[in-house]
Structure formats: structure tokens, C-alpha cells
Image: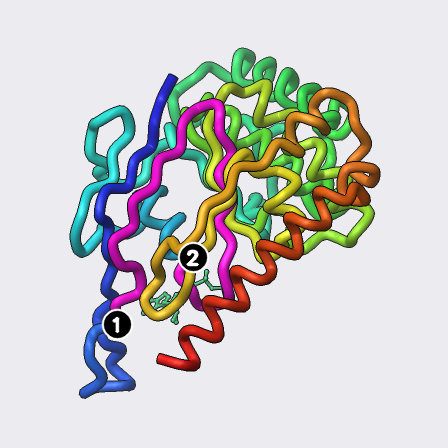
Amino acid sequence: MSTLTFRSVSLRYPPRAARAGVGEKLVLDGIDLQVASHELVAIIGRSGSGKTSLLNLAAGFLEPTAGTITVDGVPIEGPSADRAVVFQDDALYPWLDARDNIALPFKLKGVPLAERRARAEQLLARVGLADAGDRRIWELSGGMRQRVGIARALAAEPRFLLLDEPLGALDALTRTRMQEFLLRIKAESGAGALLITHSIEEALLLGTRIVVLSPNPGRLTAEIEAGFNAEVLNGASVAAVKASPIFKRMHAGLTGLIHASAEEEIAA
Ligand SMILES: Nc1ncnc2c1ncn2[C@@H]1O[C@H](COP(=O)(O)OP(=O)(O)OP(=O)(O)O)[C@@H](O)[C@H]1O
């Protein structure tokens, strides 16, 4: 089991050149957060509250201004295949077919051609795209492209999946299907997951824990546990779970928490 730990993490972006004279911007302040292998921690918060900044810190794309981020006690020192990132726009290589996009991490590791193709085939099958390996990226639907992106992320057998709005660009029906898919893939992989989403509904459905990030500066102001993901994994339909009174109550509660953070900001 692995744990990703943020301890008293703050992030300050330097002033932008175009806005000389404006002080450095404190974006995240005193973030304490842990994500263990069995968890999917969903971060929600208003636009600009620092969600992507937080994920970029976990990915090692940014360094904290203060505090520490560790994996199993070892400080993060930059990006690593151990913490695979999936973005909203799939970041796939259009000139490669689906199989070669997935095989790329193996190629970078020096895995021989036949083996990397075989491993890519296994991953394609795992994400339900066994017949799509030869297709170019532009020949795939949005949902299929995200599956390829997720398969590529899984190729390195990461300890953590860092998901930045991975389903944000999909239509409602595909998104619902992909939510269930993501839960199953995450559970099978054994990786911990940090999910950034604008959708309270998605956070509640997928998260074992949901944390609310309030803006200016970004602080974690609320945290709730949820068990809807386990219901879906145990066979309940996503539609039925979302329609249940308890889901609706928790949704309303989370909506209230996000609005409360907005009102505090206006009052301050
Ligand atoms: N590279 C950067 N340099 C300076 N400021 C930045 C940079 N990246 C983000 N910011 C600022 O930091 C704040 C938080 O941005 P961030 O993208 O992390 O928020 P977010 O919650 O993910 O927003 P959204 O939901 O709109 O994607 C914003 O005020 C943004 O303008």
C-alpha cells in the first residue's frame, strides 16, 4: 500500500510580467492531504480555487513554496511514471495508432518491440478496445480516446493516478459510462487516485472521499466520506445511485459548502 501525502503545502506563483507591481500570488495555503492506494480522493472547488495547481504539485510539475509532498515518506522530486497524469484533452499522439500510443511508455523504457506490442494489446483489452489498436487517434470517439489515455497511464503501473477533469469533454451519456469504467479500472489497478472535477455529482459518485477547496488562497475547508463508488462496483446502476435520496441530500450539502466558501470570500 502506498500513500501520497501533502504536509502544510503552500504554493505561490511569481507575479506575472504583464502585471508588474502586483505581489506574488498565494494560490494554495497550508494543504494537508493524504491519498492511500485504496482511495479515490475527489477535489472540488470553484474555478480558480487551485485544483489544477494542487494536482500539478502531486505530479511533480510544480514545486511547493513551503511544505512537503511525499510518496511513502520519500519527497517528490519531479514527474515520475509512478504518478501518471490523465488530462481532459487526452494528450495522445495523433500520428500514432491507439496501440503505439499505449506502447510509448514501454518504448521509452527500452522494452523490445514484440513485448511492448503484446503489453499494449493487453491494456487495449483491459480498457475495452481490443479491436481498436490499429486505429489512428482521430478515428476514435472522445470516450475511446480517453480510454487510450487511461490505458497509457496504466502502462507504467503507477502507484497513483492523477486525473485532471478526465471526463470533462465528454457528452453526458458517454461521461456516465466512463465514470463506471474509471471506477472499475482504478479498482483493478490497485493505484490510489486524485481526481479533479467541476462536477459535484461526479465527485460524489467516484470519490471515496471528497474534499472542498476554497479559493483565495486555496485551502481545504471540508471533507466528506462517500460510499457510492462501492455501490457501483458492487453492481448498482449509476443512474439508480444518482437518483437515490441520500445521493441527492449529499449533493445538496456539497453544493451548499461550495457556495458558503464563495459567500465568505465576498464578505471578507
Ligand atoms: N502558471 C501560473 N502562473 C501564475 N498564476 C497561475 C498559474 N497557473 C494558475 N495560476 C493562478 O492560480 C489560481 C488557481 O489556478 P488553478 O488553475 O490551479 O485553479 P483551478 O481550481 O484548477 O481552476 P479551474 O477550475 O478554472 O480549472 C488562478 O488564480 C490562476 O489564475
Q: Which of 199 and 105 is in front in this view?
A: 199
- Asked if the beta carbon under badge 1 is closer than 8 A to the nearest atom of ligand 1, the reply is yes
Query: Relative to 20, does residue 104 appear above or below in the rendering?
Result: above
Query: What secondary structure is found at the residue carrying circle 2?
Result: strand
Mark sitting on residue 12: none
The residue shown at (43%, 81%) is 266
Verify CB contact (< 8 Å) between mark 1 and mark 2.
no
Residue 54 visible in the picture: yes
| Residue to which mark 1 is pinned | 25
Measured as percent of width and height from the top left, residue 183 is found at 64, 30
Query: What secondary structure is found at the residue carrying circle 1?
Result: strand
| N-term-proximal mark, 1 vs 2 | 1
| Quarter of the image with the C terminus in it | bottom left
Q: State the separation of the CA atoms marked 1 and 2.
A: 16 Å
Q: Amino acid type of disc 1?
A: Lys
Residue 164 is covered by the magenta coloring: no
| In this picture, residue 14 sits left or right of residue 2 | left
| Quarter of the image with the N terminus in it | top left
Measured as percent of width and height from the top left, residue 218 is found at 35, 62
Q: Nearer the viewer, residue 261 or 161?
A: 261
Residue 136 visible in the picture: no
Measured as percent of width and height from the top left, residue 195 is found at 51, 43
- Asked if the beta carbon under badge 2 is closer than 8 A to the nearest atom of ligand 1, the reply is yes
Mark sitting on residue 213: 2
Query: Relative to 166, does residue 74 appear above or below in the rendering?
Result: above
The magenta span reads: 25-52
The residue shown at (74%, 46%) is 175
Q: Which of 40 and 167 is in front in this view?
A: 40
Q: Main secondary structure of the magenta part?
A: strand
| In this picture, residue 248 sits left or right of residue 109 | right
